[in-house]
Image (cartoon, rainbow, N blue to C red):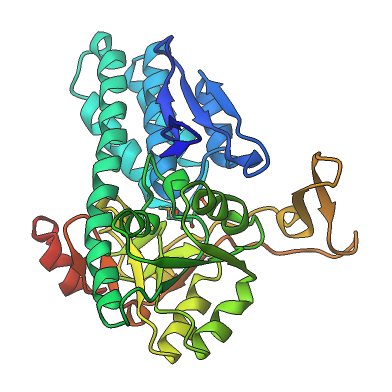
Amino acid sequence: MNVGERHYRTIWLSDDEHSVEIIDQRWLPHAFRIEKIGTVAGIATAIRDMWVRGAPLIGVTAAYGVAIQMQDDPSDEALDTVWETLHKTRPTAINLRWALDEMRRFLKPLAPAERAEAAYRRAAEIADEDVGLNRAIGENGLAIIKKIAAKKKPGETVNILTHCNAGWLATVDYGTATAPIYLATEAGIPVHVYVDETRPRNQGAQLTAWEMAGHGVPHTLIVDNAGGHLMQHGDIDMVIVGTDRTTANGDVCNKIGTYLKALAAADNDVPFYVALPSPTIDWTVADGLKEIPIEERSGDEVSLVWGKTSDGKVAQVRVSPDATPAANPAFDVTPARLVTGLITERGVAKASREGLKAMFPERG
Ligand code: MRU
């Protein structure tokens, strides 16, 4: 998407062709910084410490990490080691494992001397595929927004609530939950987005709000606890969120707090949609609550909040007593029964084993 006049993806191959450049998301919305990364250790840090984040982008970054490793050492052993090293960086988003598996499957049959070039090529293809998947998700989600708009008076706004950042910053481009929003805006459908701030790391306040502002989408930032109240008052027409891992049964794992939004949506008859590309489906897992590993991040993310001070410096402030411990589970699981539909690149699936099988019969 554009930043100012220039089109950016979130990750691209450097001109030197053996490192990648990324938008360093730790500094947004206060500063737009690009980082160049040319080592596997650097890729691991960027994923673990969330310079890049969002399930699809984590996967693509890891794919480039494999390519960087193949350039240094294309042996079978190095391929297995880089798989292990990068797989450990973040446990919940399944796109990471998907991308690492795909790179290894693709590279293993090749002679070591062929691997580096092939790995960069495949990583670039995975990045391009992500853009195509998101564009298709956008079209399928747009059809839902159009239906909701058609039930309103002409010109009346469709109010959409979203949680976390499942925007273009979380993918290579377009985003998942945001793709239908961008297409609706382009199509002239009046949409307005309620952006959950998404504590503790504030991906909504820092990233989704920055995206919406940058692309002229009317939006309002709300605290995480406001969504239920707005739904009770008829202020939300639909919820669209992304996901880090959706099970074969349609359970949806996403940023902590998503489950509470789904409960409130169900109680208020507000449709609750999840936008996802097929690499986010974990076909090996049925029960999301029991089987998905939930990342536990540092309590410092809860106790210390980043922001811009009045003299323009980006700094952290403590919001709790020094001695108070904090727990920080980063994701939760929304049971399939609370999900109205899964917006995939192929269409909108029922959040159930049957629904997903019908959409992806080759996985059945
Ligand atoms: O911890 P994060 O910022 O990586 O979490 C991101 C999310 O939870 C997104 O909603 C999810 O990855 C979907 S991104 C298209």
Q: Is residue 227 above or below residue 256?
A: below
| 153 displayed left or right of 196 | left
> Can residue 249 be seen at all in this image of the molecule?
no
Q: Is residue 294 above or below residue 174?
A: below
Residue sitting farthest toward the right = 322
Question: Looking at the image, which is closer to me, 293 or 256?
Answer: 256
Q: Quadrant of the C terminus?
A: bottom left
| 347 displayed left or right of 18 | left
Q: Quadrant of the N terminus?
A: top left
Spot occupied by residue 36 in the image (x, y as percentages of width and height): 54, 21
The quarter holding residue 141 reads bottom left
Spot occupied by residue 175 in the image (x, y as percentages of width and height): 38, 50
Residue sitting farthest toward the front = 154
Q: Is residue 14 above or below residue 52?
A: above
The quarter holding residue 335 reads bottom left
| 334 displayed left or right of 214 | left
Look at 58% across and 34% down and name the residue there: 24
> Can residue 60 be seen at all in this image of the molecule?
yes
Look at 48% across and 50% down and name the residue there: 91
Q: Is residue 132 above or below residue 298?
A: above
Spot occupied by residue 23 in the image (x, y as percentages of width and height): 53, 33
Numbered label tally: 0
Look at 33% across and 61% down and name the residue there: 275
| 299 displayed left or right of 101 | right
Look at 22% across and 29% down and name the residue there: 106
Spot occupied by residue 179 in the image (x, y as percentages of width and height): 34, 54
Question: Looking at the image, which is closer to me, 282 or 108?
Answer: 282
The quarter holding residue 119 reads top left
